[in-house]
Image (cartoon, grey):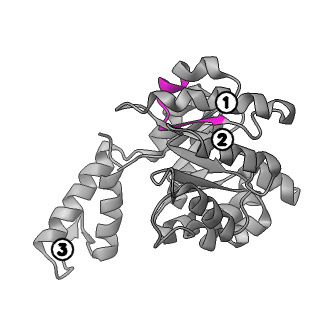
Amino acid sequence: MTLRRSVLFYPALSTERWDEAMSSGADMIVFDLEDGTVPARRAEARPLVLALYAGGKEGGQPLRLLRINNPRTEDGIRDLIAVLDCAAPPDGLILPKIEHAEEIRWVADLLRPRHPDMELIVLIESPRGVKNAMEIASATQGTTGPQVSCLFLGTADFSASIGSDLGWDALAHARAETVLAAQEAGIDAMDGVWFDPTDEAGLIEEARRIASMGFTGKASYDQIQIAHIHAAFTPTAEQVDWAERVLAAAAADPLGTARVDGKMVNESIARRARRIIARRPL
């Protein structure tokens, strides 16, 4: 399976950092035409950043993403046209400030003829987006072509939209809605950035709590955070051992009366074990 534990952001005009991004260790890297590029320089940035993807993706490299502007805006439409014209496009697009499933279907329909394998990562950044998260997450289900692969809660923009801080209590409801929608659709769930790269303890604790909620990854602006993020979203050797024993016990006793470490093994426990195995280190 494709792991999406981390996504590392770079400004679109920082094209000299492409090799750094490729060797960063992140599961996904993204060059950013939205918040990472001032509006006056987006026209300049488009051809420069899109040229970086022309070399194609090699084995072992991260997923190479591009954050475009919201598709309801003029800059977003120009970004999409530039992507459509690429012979070798990014592996996926990050779509910001999405509030309705129809926005996703429109983008997918537009991309399908030329880039049918492109994945879509959807940023939820407003109360309306959270309210419609379930429909947004499943917007491309049952269709061919570009698919939503990950629901991404933009915690900074969301907190700004409701006037809250970035504390746990303020974001708990939006996080719960995001992860439930992603899990219902069978896709990944990404949490927002921890903004202080010097506060390793704070990042570790938040990533641990996010992972325990069911999120599968967390975003970053700093390469130094990637190892901590991966540690939070990668099963430990002990967890993998438990999962393997659970699945072996379930296979040997399909009636659901088996026990592992004294605890009953039923289908819900086996399902949790399969999720752990799917995300174990390669």
Q: Is residue 127 left or right of residue 185?
A: right
Residue at the extreme left: 252
Amino acid under disc 2: Ala
Q: Which span of residues is magenta-colored?
A: 21-31
Q: CA distance from mark 3 to mark 1?
A: 59 Å
Q: Neighbour class for label 2 at 10 Å: few (<14), some, many (≥20)?
A: some
Camera-near label (3 vs 2) is 2
Q: How many marks?
A: 3
Q: Residue at x 57, y 31 (%)?
A: 225
Find disc 1 in the rendering and name its residue. Answer: 47
Image spot of residue 64 (x, y percent): 51, 37
Amino acid under disc 1: Pro
Disc 2, disc 1: CB below 8 Å? yes
Question: In the drawing, what numbered circle is on residue 82?
Answer: 2
Q: Residue at x 78, y 61 (%)?
A: 126
Q: Is residue 15 magenta?
A: no
Q: Is residue 176 visible?
A: no
Amino acid under disc 3: Ala
Image spot of residue 28 (x, y percent): 51, 38
Image spot of residue 103 (x, y percent): 68, 64
